[in-house]
Image: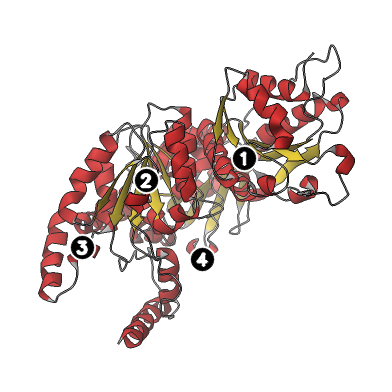
Amino acid sequence: MTTIAELIVESLAEHGVRTVWGVVGDALNPVTDAIRREERVEWVGVRHEEVAAFAASAQAQLTDDLAVCMGTVGPGAIHLLNGLYDAKKSHAPVLAICGQVPLGEVGTDFFQEVDNNRLFSDVALFAETVTSPEQMPHLLERAVNAAIGGRGVAVLTLPGDVGGLDVPKGVRAPRFAPAPRPSAAPDADVARAAELLATGGEATLLVGCGARGARAEVLELARVLGAPMVLTLKAKEGFEHDNPYAVGQTGLIGNPAATKALEDADVLVLVGTDFPYRDWIPTGKRVVQLDARATHIGRRTSVEVALVGDAGETLRTLLPHLQPREAGKHLTGAQEKYADWLQGQHRLADPEHDKSLLGRLRSVGDNPQSRIRPEAVAMAVDRHAGADTVFTSDTGMSTVWLSRLVPMSGSRRLVGSYNLGSMANAMPMALGAQALDRERQVVAFCGDGGLMMLLGDLRTAVTHHLPVVLVVFDNGRLGMVKLEQEQGGLPEFGTVLDNPDIAAVATAMGLTARRVTDPDDLDEAIATALASRTPYLLDVVTNPDEVAVPGKTTPSQAWGFAIAKAKEQITSA
């Protein structure tokens, strides 16, 4: 006979699931025992369930297929929520298997009891509880089909006395539905878009990760239109390399060239993006938006022509209707401005720049050991990282430095909490990425604040032989919050972090670790870390006062920053 738990695990293995993330617990013992006996599936036991959900979210984003995490009764299930929200907002197909109190105790306010169906109702496309063997395999099919077909989270709850029950004799194996076939937008809408693009004037593309499978078509569209291409952060990995039309990102992490390219355009073409920051999308433009999800159309700006369909299929239909135009000043001006900005960023990371700065600081008695530039860290990682490295980053300044200074060349990949914007995601996502391929280099850009939140799972990298490289930007600050306070005219408050020696902590937990305080040691330290094939933490003490200027600053932001700095000086006097 086959139990409910065995049916679930065997079916997931048949689908291709190779890792399950979680913390063991009594209600899910039948499931973990089934995993123990299933050679195709690896159990990765973590120290906190939030790590399990983040790791599964990363795997789903990188493979574009189902990933699985588990949390047992009550608190164990609750701990999954933040990582599951990341999966939801990233459109990542994740199945969470959660425990529940015995059936006879449901509804009695039993020890650890929570109503999982209600708890997960907002984050999940599907959330149901198995109460009888006769519900299998139908509930499992519905859960997996919801996650894959809806590109989101499904939650299947198993009471403690249900997982070990036998399914009825002769029950068929689950059959999961395939993902829907991509299709082009309607011909009439394509014709309207072609007419607008032919007569509307200068165009700029804003491209997101929804166009990742249509790289060739998007580049051809930029060539035909003579258009600069602004990329969202999540589009870096698909479009940044070998792309003469790319002019970087816009928004708070962006640059002046991207901002100007959008502002100077007559027509904006949004392809596969739900870029959320309305203030960075100029108004008064004619807009064509292409997206597979109709709910994204017009959500951020007014749209004149909506194209609902797959990016590749739709562009292959659209391109024959367009006549190529010569590249003019709109494109070349944006390219030149972007090249100038990049050169300035590289100057900030030049070791000679730091040496001259350190000389001035020594002359006034400042401590040079707190002045490693984060830009220099990012560029050193880029120099020594492989062409197929997977990068993750914590939300905040770590993402800024990666976005600006680490190009996604070759077959590099990038994953982070770029829709939910959670802290503490970089290390768990790196673990998830590394478990997919232990031979591939995985580098996490960790903020010191984020890493400390889930510090216990450093040990997970050691226990499960996951040779991630964790580069910690140890500036002793919640840096993005500090910047936000100062731009608003407020003095820095509550952002200072009283960190331990993070490298010493990591060493005590079994990782190879090193603390870097001198810019002269930086390049060699990063080269050594990236050449290692063991879990490695590099604790780099960076300048807490380093500022990342967005692509466009308002007078109020500049004035607010000046006022904040004055207040800080008065307070510290």
The alpha-carbon separation of the residues under discs 2 and 1 comes to 48 Å
Q: Which residue is mark 1?
A: 292
Which circle's residue, 3 or 1, is located before the other in the chain?
Answer: 1
Q: Which residue is mark 2?
A: 508
Q: How many marks?
A: 4
Tell me, yes or no, whether the two marked residues, 2 and 4, touch with CB atoms within 8 Å.
no
**Label 2 environment density (alpha carbons within 10 Å; few <14, some 14–19, many ≥20):** few
Which element is circle 2 on?
Answer: helix
Residue mark closest to the camera, 4 vs 3 = 3
Tell me, yes or no, whether the two marked residues, 2 and 1, touch with CB atoms within 8 Å.
no
Residue mark closest to the camera, 2 vs 4 = 2
Q: Which residue is mark 4?
A: 279
**Label 3 environment density (alpha carbons within 10 Å; few <14, some 14–19, many ≥20):** some
Q: Residue at x 38, y 34 (%)?
A: 467
Residue type at the position of mark 3: Gln
Which circle's residue, 3 or 2, is located before the other in the chain?
Answer: 3
Residue mark closest to the camera, 3 vs 1 = 3
Which circle's residue, 2 or 1, is located before the other in the chain?
Answer: 1
Which circle's residue, 2 or 4, is located before the other in the chain?
Answer: 4
Q: Is residue 77 visible?
A: yes
Residue type at the position of mark 2: Ala
The alpha-carbon separation of the residues under discs 2 and 4 comes to 46 Å
Q: Residue at x 63, y 56 (%)?
A: 299
The alpha-carbon separation of the residues under discs 3 and 1 comes to 50 Å
**Label 4 environment density (alpha carbons within 10 Å; few <14, some 14–19, many ≥20):** few
The alpha-carbon separation of the residues under discs 4 and 3 comes to 38 Å
Q: Which residue is mark 3?
A: 369
Query: Where residue 314 sits: x, y (%)?
Result: 57, 35
